């Protein structure tokens, strides 16, 4: 059973009584503006991404011909907001499983803009942090113990020293063969090393709307993903899949995140607001390449559906939620 998200009141801005109680009363643009005001610590990213060559399709930039998610500036902004959402959910912590203070080597697979890796490198200055992705759009000014590498986790891993902690977050649908990726992670972990997998599931309504645009969107994306040879959702975080790769699953937890500020609990409002923004911006990002390539949709039709889903999610009285699952596994000693 999914649990309700618990957020530290001191980190969630719970004392802000001026915040509206329901994000459905605001437009997506005004929600983003509200976040900007409430999150003054949000940094403006000066990324090296402008230097790498993107594949442009339907006005979105992609890293290669196969991965369905974009890597353009719009997506980089969404990833920054998503990172803030995760840290808010975890009450300021960087992982569900506590990272040991004496950690020596950390690997962040699919690092994106590198926010998580940068934060870990700053918090653990004596650790060596390696962050990989299929393209390079991370900041140039990073801690000296952090190393970005262009690498595809679906290929054979060639590291010569084991890691104590491997982090995989937000990569639902990234790999067609998760079992192979987990076997490589197991092979490159030290004895008793930790693998943490975190991801969001499918958006749902607390009270389903018959024939909703959201249900059309979810069904179309799942069908397109299946045609492309990948799976969306949280199947890749299942216990059996990790155990088949040699891991011992220590714990797993699914949190129900209220999208928006409709929750009566003030501790959940900031995380819910950021999750809503990430979800609204992610609708097009997650669907455009999938639907145009594998379902023969026109780009304008995809964007029209995304716009209708956005309006539906923002409608007064609608209470959307999204599951977030954390799975922690260990490589047993021996």
Image (cartoon, rainbow, N blue to C red):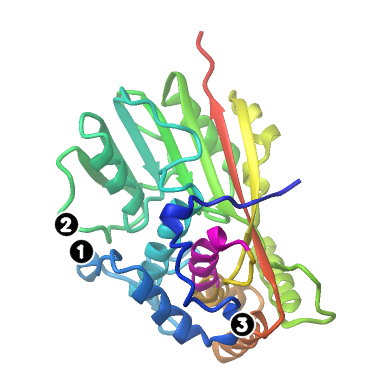
Residue annotated with mark 3: 24
Q: Start and end of the magenta stretch? A: 265-279
Give the residue displayed 81% in from the left and 73% down from the top: 208
**Residue drawn where x is 24% and y is 69% of the image:** 44
Element under disc 2: loop
> Earlier along the polypeptide chain: callout 2 or callout 3?
3
Locate residue 134, reporting x and y percent.
36, 54
For the stretch drawn in magenta, the main secondary structure is helix
- Spatial distance from mark 1 to mark 3, Cα to Cα? 36 Å
Question: Few, some or many C-alpha atoms within 10 Å of disc 2 (few <14, some 14-19, many ≥20)?
Answer: few
Distance between mark 1 and mark 2 Cα atoms:
6 Å
Q: Which mark is residue 138?
A: none
Q: Does residue 311 lie above or below 197 as drawn? A: below
**Who comes first in sequence, dot 1 or dot 2?**
1
Q: Relative to 159, say whether 212 is above or below.
A: below
In the rendered image, residue 270, in percent from the top left (x then y), is placed at 49, 64
Q: Residues within 10 Å of mark 1 (few under 14, many from 20)?
A: some
Nearer to us of marks 1 and 3 is 3
User: Which label number is shown at residue 140?
Assistant: 2
Q: Tell me: residue 293, above or below residue 312.
A: above
Residue 104, quarter of picture = top left
Residue 48: which disc? 1
Out of 3 and 327, give the one closest to the viewer. 3
Helix, strand or loop for disc 3: helix
Q: Determine the residue positioned at 59% across, 38% down.
A: 327
Across and down, in percent, residue 129 comes to 28, 37
């Amino acid at each position: 059973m999914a649990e309700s998200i618990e957020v530290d009141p001191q980190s969630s801005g719970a004392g802000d009584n001026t915040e509206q109680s329901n994000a459905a009363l605001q437009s997506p643009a005004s929600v983003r503006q509200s976040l900007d005001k409430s999150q003054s610590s949000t940094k403006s990213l000066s990324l090296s991404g402008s230097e790498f060559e993107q594949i442009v399709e339907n006005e979105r930039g992609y890293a290669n011909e196969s991965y369905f998610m974009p890597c353009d500036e719009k997506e980089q902004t969404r990833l920054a907001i998503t990172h803030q959402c995760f840290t808010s959910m975890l009450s300021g912590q960087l992982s569900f499983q506590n990272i040991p203070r004496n950690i020596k080597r950390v690997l962040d697979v699919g690092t994106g803009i590198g926010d998580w890796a940068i934060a870990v490198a700053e918090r653990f200055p004596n650790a060596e942090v390696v962050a990989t992705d299929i393209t390079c759009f991370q900041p140039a000014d990073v801690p000296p113990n952090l190393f970005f590498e262009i690498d595809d986790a679906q290929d054979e891993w060639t590291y010569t020293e084991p890691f104590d902690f491997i982090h995989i977050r937000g990569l639902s649908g990234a790999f067609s063969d998760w079992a192979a990726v987990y076997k490589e992670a197991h092979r490159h972990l030290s004895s008793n090393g930790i693998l943490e997998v975190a991801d969001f599931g499918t958006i749902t309504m607390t009270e389903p709307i018959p024939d909703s645009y959201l249900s059309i969107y979810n069904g179309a994306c799942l069908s397109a993903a299946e045609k492309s040879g990948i799976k969306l959702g949280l199947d890749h975080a299942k216990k059996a899949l990790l155990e088949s790769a040699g891991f011992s699953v220590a714990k797993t937890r699914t949190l129900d995140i209220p999208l928006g500020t409709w929750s009566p609990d003030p501790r959940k409002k900031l995380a819910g607001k950021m999750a809503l923004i990430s979800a609204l911006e992610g609708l097009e990002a997650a669907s455009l390449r999938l639907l145009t390539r594998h379902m023969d949709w026109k780009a304008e039709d995809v964007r029209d559906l995304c716009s209708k889903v956005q309006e539906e999610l923002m409608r007064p009285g609608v209470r959307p939620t999204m599951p977030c699952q954390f799975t922690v596994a260990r490589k047993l000693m021996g």
